[in-house]
Image (cartoon, helix red, strand yellow):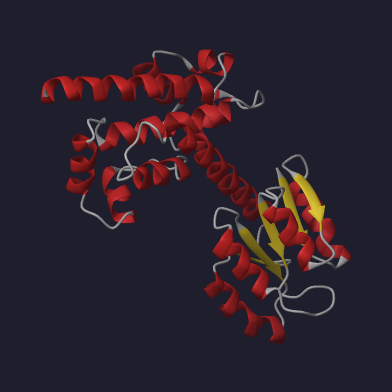
Amino acid sequence: MILAALVWDPASRARLQDALRGQASLRFCERQGELVTLVENNLAGVVVLDTRDREGHSTLKTVRYIRDNFPSVPVVLYFAISPDTSRDVLPFARAGVNDLVLRDVDDLRYSLRLALSTAADHCSAKTILSELQPLIPASVMPMLRYCLENGRRALTVEDVADALNVHRKTLVARLGGAHLPTPSALISWCRILVAARLLEDPGRSVEQVALLLEFPSGTSMRNMMKRYTGLRPGEIRENGGVRCVLHAFKAAMTGVVDRGRLSAG
């Protein structure tokens, strides 16, 4: 993944390089237009910028453009506190930056890793949703999207219902009406899909993935994978990761739909 940075002073560039070492490719941009072009061409998964560019022009319009047109691309504002920037921060926050990082104060490495994780989750969710769209009714897609984009969290049905501003019974009714699994089962499938993507990285152990996804232990994640897919994490990794779990998920969705149609008939 490429992180596009519109940060012009040498000290800040050096800090960015150090914070991202071994995590992502870093592309420094000299102008706002260059940064926007990278985003528009799907070449930048995360954006980091200062409140002003090298010529002293505000980057606020660029933030608004990215947030309005590419909401899945996280934007991190990286700036130093001064009388001028203090006045600028509120408009940037209102424009929708995902994180505010104070130079020499906040943990830049942590903030950037979080942004990279968010970008990867959104990208993965988009790919998975395109695969599942023929099987999933439009009324269920917002729930599926939310669960995939937030698959690193141990979501409850109430969490999802609150995020979508509906009652939990509404989620149950939507899934039941489509002859799909229960909300809790759908949440579990989404967690397994996110885990499968992380397992595609050979450098990650099962325990590390379980920790990232807020499982109580590696054993609990293994048990969930086995229960839903019939496969252990190592077998999922060896058989294509996400592709493998998607195949099992599609088969499960089709089976539930077919049983629902038979009972309805």
The residue sitting at 12% across, 22% down in the picture is: 263
Comparing 116 with 214, the one in front is 116
State the image coordinates of residue 194 (x, y, percent, origin top left). Answer: 49, 33
Comparing 38 with 78, the one in front is 38
The residue sitting at 59% across, 45% down in the picture is: 117
The residue sitting at 67% across, 48% down in the picture is: 42
Comparing 147 with 202, the one in front is 147
Left/right of residue 256 with respect to residue 2 in the rendered view: left
Instruction: Pick the quarter of the image with the C terminus.
Output: top left
Residue 254, picture quadrant:
top left
State the image coordinates of residue 247 (x, y, percent, origin top left). Answer: 45, 20
State the image coordinates of residue 262 (x, y, percent, origin top left). Answer: 16, 19
Left/right of residue 211 with respect to residue 82 in the rendered view: left
Comparing 51 with 175, the one in front is 175
Left/right of residue 56 with respect to residue 108 in the rendered view: right
Left/right of residue 222 with respect to residue 160 in the rendered view: right
Instruction: Pick the quarter of the image with the N terminus.
Output: top right
State the image coordinates of residue 179 (x, y, percent, origin top left). Answer: 22, 30
* Number of numbered discs: 0
Give the vertical position of 257 relative to 157 (above or below): above
